[in-house]
């Protein structure tokens, strides 16, 4: 049904842009900096309120601090009454759902079990991701029930990977910054579904190469270029929704990398049309293993939904080496707002139930868990690992490090910060070398903080924290939630 006809409506603007002419040096920098064309020059800067998205680029770059931007009114209902359209958005859910990380606290050592000084004693953050054999033989060597070769585990210097963000949805400079940072820090980045650009091949030994429903850029060379292969089933920000990169963002370079015609919409449907059961998924997993000579771990990425534990169990039994769980607060380049904000479950719950299910079934060694979608800090990372994750993935935090101001207009392709755009005038604003150093700083800082946390807990290796829910306590959570998380309320001792 489509009966929508555009009907203009008179309403207040979403953002209130104000400019102080007393301070203004008339340099016109704000006019040049606005990626959305919202500021023009009429004997001084003038803002078009209908175009301003609150990206704050003009405010940050004004040398005189002459500009202020305030949120005036959120205008979703007015906008829909005017257009009859589905509201789109970018980045993650910003509704006021409880964040369970903020209701969990970690244990610390006191009198009888001394803490460790992380500055003076070695702390091990090295993390191995992938399938482990069923048994280690007493005299050395390994045993596994399966007669299928086990791919070597990925080795991370710190339990962090970058979330999948495709070339096309983000700029090449942004993806290059992420890839360089991953290679420098000994962690992993992820191509997303957009293929592997030539310029990023030097960093592919640290990449998950993704295979999504659109199969963009997928061939044998691509699969073998990465350190691991990932099958994308779902995304936390839009479970049950596929991808759509508009033709305007499919530049010459994007079309070559994705192996699609220039300027065509890149549509990746929600389902993979060769997967309608766990058996079908198993076929694809083993096709990818076969194509990579059983040398690359295969990850399966899903959105966290109500039945996530059973789904993850099926994925592991289908032969995946890694289960990537993307919680409902995960970010996106473009999604219907109503889907982003109301479908899926929090990553905190998903990690706990998946880890428990795999333990109960005796198959926890067969796959690693990566937790994503709402990891905001090193503390969230430590709590996710204590709940059962092997590593965490960061997307929004990485984009913030690159300069993102969370204006949520990534889907317009006009990002003023040069991150989620293919406009050459905008992409050159992001220097990949500077961006990469910021990401390296972020990973360095989080890793150092993680060492501090481990030291305070009397643990000298991240492996010892994994799944250690006894070291967590809940504050202000009801008993049912505590039971699901497998965590005791604060005040209950060992
Ligand atoms: S950037 Fe600041 S100082 Fe320059 S024209 Fe705009 S408001 Fe005036
Ligand atoms: S990436 Fe750019 S467009 Fe997207 S939220 Fe951040 S600043 Fe806004």
Image (tube, rainbow, N blue to C red):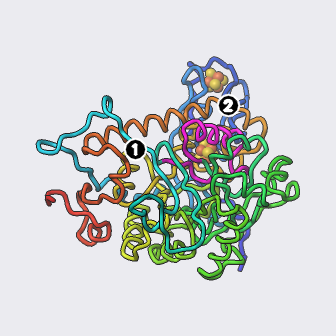
Classify 272 as above or below 51: below
Left or right: residue 491 compared with residue 104: left
Q: Residue at x 73, y 69 (%)?
A: 5
Q: Please tell me which residue lies in front, 348 or 79.
A: 348
- In this rendering, the label closer to the viewer, 2 or 1: 1
Classify 349 as above or below 182: below
Query: In the rendered image, is residue 326 in sight?
Result: yes
Image quarter of the C terminus: bottom left
Give the residue at mark 1: 378
Q: Residue at x 57, y 31 (%)?
A: 437
Ligand 2 falls in quadrant: top right
Left or right: residue 88 compared with residue 380: right
Q: Position of residue 382 (x, y in %)?
A: 36, 49
Is 396 a magenta residue?
A: no
Classify 265 as above or below 37: below
SS state under label 2: loop
Query: In the rendered image, is residue 48 in sight?
Result: no
Q: Residue at x 72, y 42 (%)?
A: 200
Q: Which residues are magenta?
A: 160-188
Give the residue at mark 2: 431
Q: Position of residue 449 (x, y in %)?
A: 37, 38
Q: Position of residue 286 (x, y in %)?
A: 66, 71
Determine the residue located farthest toward the front in the rendered image: 139
Q: Please tell me which residue lies in front, 411 or 126.
A: 126
Q: Earlier in the sequence, mark 2 or mark 1?
A: 1
Q: Residue 428 got which mark?
A: none
Asked where in the image residue 48 lies, by quadrant, the reply is top right
> Counting other residues with Cα less than 10 Å from the Cα at mark 2, is it few (<14), some (14-19), or many (20 or more)?
some
SS state under label 1: helix
């Amino acid at each position: 049904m489509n009966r929508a006809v555009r009907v203009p409506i008179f309403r207040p603007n979403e953002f209130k842009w104000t400019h102080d002419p007393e301070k203004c040096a008339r340099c016109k920098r704000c006019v040049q900096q606005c990626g959305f064309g919202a500021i023009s020059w009429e004997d001084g800067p003038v803002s078009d309120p209908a175009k301003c998205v609150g990206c704050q680029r003009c405010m940050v770059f004004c040398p005189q601090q002459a500009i202020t931007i305030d949120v005036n009114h959120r205008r979703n209902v007015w906008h829909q009454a005017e257009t009859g359209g589905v509201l789109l958005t970018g980045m993650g859910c910003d509704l006021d759902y409880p964040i369970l990380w903020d209701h969990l606290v970690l244990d610390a050592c006191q009198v009888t079990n001394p803490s460790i000084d992380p500055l003076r004693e070695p702390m091990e953050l090295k993390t191995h991701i992938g399938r482990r054999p069923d048994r280690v033989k007493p005299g050395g060597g390994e045993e596994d029930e399966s007669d299928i070769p086990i791919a070597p585990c990925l080795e991370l210097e710190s339990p962090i990977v970058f979330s999948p963000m495709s070339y096309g949805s983000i700029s090449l400079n942004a993806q290059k910054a992420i890839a360089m940072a991953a290679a420098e820090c000994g962690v992993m980045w992820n191509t997303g579904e957009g293929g592997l650009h030539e310029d990023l091949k030097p960093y592919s030994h640290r990449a998950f190469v993704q295979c999504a429903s659109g199969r963009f850029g997928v061939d044998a060379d691509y699969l073998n270029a990465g350190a691991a292969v990932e099958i994308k089933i779902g995304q936390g920000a839009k479970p049950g929704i596929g991808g759509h990169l508009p033709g305007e963002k499919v530049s010459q370079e994007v079309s070559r990398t994705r192996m699609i015609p220039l300027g065509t919409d890149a549509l990746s449907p929600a389902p993979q049309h060769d997967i309608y059961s766990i058996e079908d998924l198993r076929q694809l997993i083993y096709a990818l293993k076969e194509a990579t000579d059983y040398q690359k771990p295969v990850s399966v990425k899903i959105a966290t939904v109500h039945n996530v534990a059973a789904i993850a169990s099926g994925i592991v039994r289908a032969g995946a080496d890694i289960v990537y769980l993307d919680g409902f607060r995960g970010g996106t380049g473009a999604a219907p707002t109503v889907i982003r904000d109301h479908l899926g479950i929090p990553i905190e719950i998903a990690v706990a139930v998946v880890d428990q299910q795999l333990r109960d079934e005796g198959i926890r060694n067969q796959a690693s868990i990566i937790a994503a979608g709402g990891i905001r800090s090193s503390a969230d990372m430590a709590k996710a690992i204590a709940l059962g994750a092997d590593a965490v993935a960061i997307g929004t935090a990485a984009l913030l490090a690159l300069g993102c101001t969370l204006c949520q207009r990534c889907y317009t392709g006009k990002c003023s910060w040069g991150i989620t755009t293919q406009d050459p005038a905008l992409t050159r604003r992001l220097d990949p070398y500077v961006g990469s150093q910021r990401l390296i700083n972020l990973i360095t800082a989080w890793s150092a903080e993680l060492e501090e946390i481990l030291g305070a807990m009397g643990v000298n290796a991240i492996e010892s924290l994994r799944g250690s829910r006894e070291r967590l306590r809940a504050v202000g959570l009801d008993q049912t939630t505590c039971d699901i998380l497998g965590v005791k309320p604060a005040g209950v001792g060992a």
